[in-house]
Every structure is written in C-alpha cells, then in structure tokens.
Image: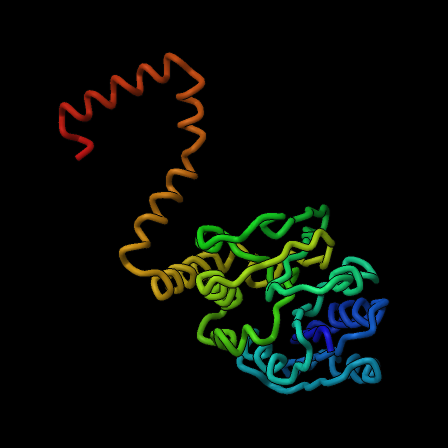
C-alpha cells in the first residue's frame, strides 16, 4: 500500500465530516484511511460510523493529546508513506494523492504546497520551495506538516512524535530527519487547505511555542554550533540594513566613521 491517510479529531464534528468527505472523494485507490478520535462527545462518533465503510480503521477513545493520537495512527498504519490530515482540513482537490504519487520517489519526505485558510482570505505556501532543505531552514522555519508525506520507516529510525511537547513535536521530528541527512522532494501540487486556527498557529500559544522550540534546539544542537546559527539568523534579519548601506554612499560613509570610532573606543570588543 502506497499511503496511509491519518485523521485525528476531538469534538470537531463538522470539521471531521468535511475532512472525511475530502478523503473519500480522492480518485486514487492505493491508500488506507485511519481516523483517531479522542472520545468526542459532540456526535463525531456518529459521523465516523456513517462513513465507516470508507474507513479502514477507526477508534473513539480518550487520548493524551494531539501527538499521542498521531502516534496511535502511526502504529496502525500499513502504508509506505503517511499523511496527516487533521479534522477541519481538507484535500485541495480530488486528485491530490494521484498527483503526488504519479511517479515513484526515493526520498523519505515529500513536500507539497499548502493553502492557508484565514477565513476571509487564503495564501499559498510552497513548503520551502523547489530546493534542498537545510539544517538552517529547520532552525528558523519548518516543513509544513499537513502538506508533507512521510515515509513510515522514518518513524522507526527517529522515533515517534515526542508526546511531552504539545505544539512543536512535528517540527522536532523534521529537524531530527534533516540533521540525520534525510533528503526531501518538492512536489508542486496543492495538497491541503489548512485552517489557520489550530494550536500551532494560534497566537495565544506563542510563549509556549517559543519555549518548546528553544527546548528542542538546545536538545538537538551542540553548544558550540548553536552560536553560529544564532549569529547567522541575526545577520539574515538585518540584511536590509546591509543592503541599504551598500546602495547609499552617505550611509556607507557614516557607517565607516562609526565603525572606526567604535574600534578606537573599544566598544566593539
């Protein structure tokens, strides 16, 4: 079997129905569908039962959070690649799976595009685009989980999602894979319409998001390597200043004078 589609859900009956219908509408047949519900009390179980003949495996029981539910799905999955399509999110068209798997891949991570739904507008994100993904990409950014297909053996190699983390465990997994030298392939296909109101994109969780990222970076990156990446990030964030100085002769002169003064006064030491 080529791909396992995994949907996790909790008390999102309307969104779950949309997601299920987008999966079963695919014109591709070499897939299985797994639904992991966290014991919803809003009628979600009734919806799952309504579509049960289209679902290879489902369960509705309490879990320990988003990543625990995903790990349950991974344990059940039989596909070569796994794709996580959470309740409320839908495939961008009926031929997503047939387009992505129109040709064979050797890469373990397949990056498609994501349509971000803000309610009153949409944006297309290219999931780091048609180029190699680097460690620095993961340091400052991430691969889009809902638009990325993951070969199942990667979870055997790097482990399941870290259930201690509540927001960034998928980013940690991708970070580990890129640090491990895994290759990715860019597939220029719109994969998912993603609702931009989940926990990972909710601004109210901003402090926890940053704290978890810092925790993961400290865990994965050596102490003598981290300062170089921080310095590179600072330079990238301030590149507009460098470009302005290069293009403006007066600004360049002022910059040189200030730099000379700083050296004379020992400020830059």
What residue is rendered at 72% in x and 74% in y? 2
Residue 167 visible (yes or no) = no
Classify residue 212 by image quadrant: bottom left
What residue is drawn where x is 86% and y is 67%?
27
Q: Residue most toward the left?
A: 265
Which residue is more in the foreground, 34 or 198? 34
**Left or right: 231, with 175 as reference point:** left
In this rendering, the count of numbered labels is 0
Classify 1 as above or below 28: below
Determine which quarter of the picture holds residue 248.
top left
Q: Position of residue 44 (x, y in %)?
A: 74, 79
Residue shown at the point (65%, 69%) measured from the top left: 84
Q: Is residue 204 above or below residue 124?
A: below
Q: Residue 255 location in percent, x, y?
A: 31, 20
Coloring scheme of the render?
Answer: rainbow
Residue 265, horizontal then vertical, whole percent: 13, 25
């Amino acid at each position: 079997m080529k791909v396992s589609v995994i949907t996790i859900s909790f008390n999102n009956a309307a969104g779950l129905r949309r997601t299920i219908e987008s999966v079963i509408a695919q014109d591709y047949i070499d897939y299985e569908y797994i639904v992991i519900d966290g014991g919803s009390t809003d009628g979600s179980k009734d919806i799952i039962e309504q579509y049960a003949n289209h679902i290879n495996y489902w369960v509705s029981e309490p879990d320990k959070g988003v990543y625990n539910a995903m790990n349950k799905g991974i344990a059940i999955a039989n596909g070569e690649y796994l794709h996580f399509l959470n309740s409320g999110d839908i495939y961008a068209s009926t031929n997503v799976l047939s387009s992505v798997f129109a040709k064979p891949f050797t890469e373990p991570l397949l990056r498609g595009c994501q349509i971000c739904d803000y309610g009153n507008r949409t944006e297309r994100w290219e999931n780091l685009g048609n180029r190699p993904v680097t460690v620095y990409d993961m340091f400052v950014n991430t691969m889009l989980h809902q638009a990325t297909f993951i070969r199942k053996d990667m979870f055997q190699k790097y482990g399941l999602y870290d259930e201690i983390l509540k927001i960034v465990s998928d980013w940690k997994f991708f970070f580990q894979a890129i640090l491990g030298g895994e290759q990715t392939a860019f597939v220029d296909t719109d994969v998912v319409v993603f609702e931009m109101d989940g926990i990972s994109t909710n601004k109210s969780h901003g402090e926890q998001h940053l704290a978890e990222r810092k925790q993961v970076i400290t865990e994965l990156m050596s102490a003598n390597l981290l300062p170089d990446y921080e310095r590179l990030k600072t330079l990238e964030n301030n590149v507009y200043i460098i470009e302005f100085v290069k293009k403006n002769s007066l600004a360049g002169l002022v910059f040189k004078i200030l730099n000379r003064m700083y050296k004379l006064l020992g400020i830059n030491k």
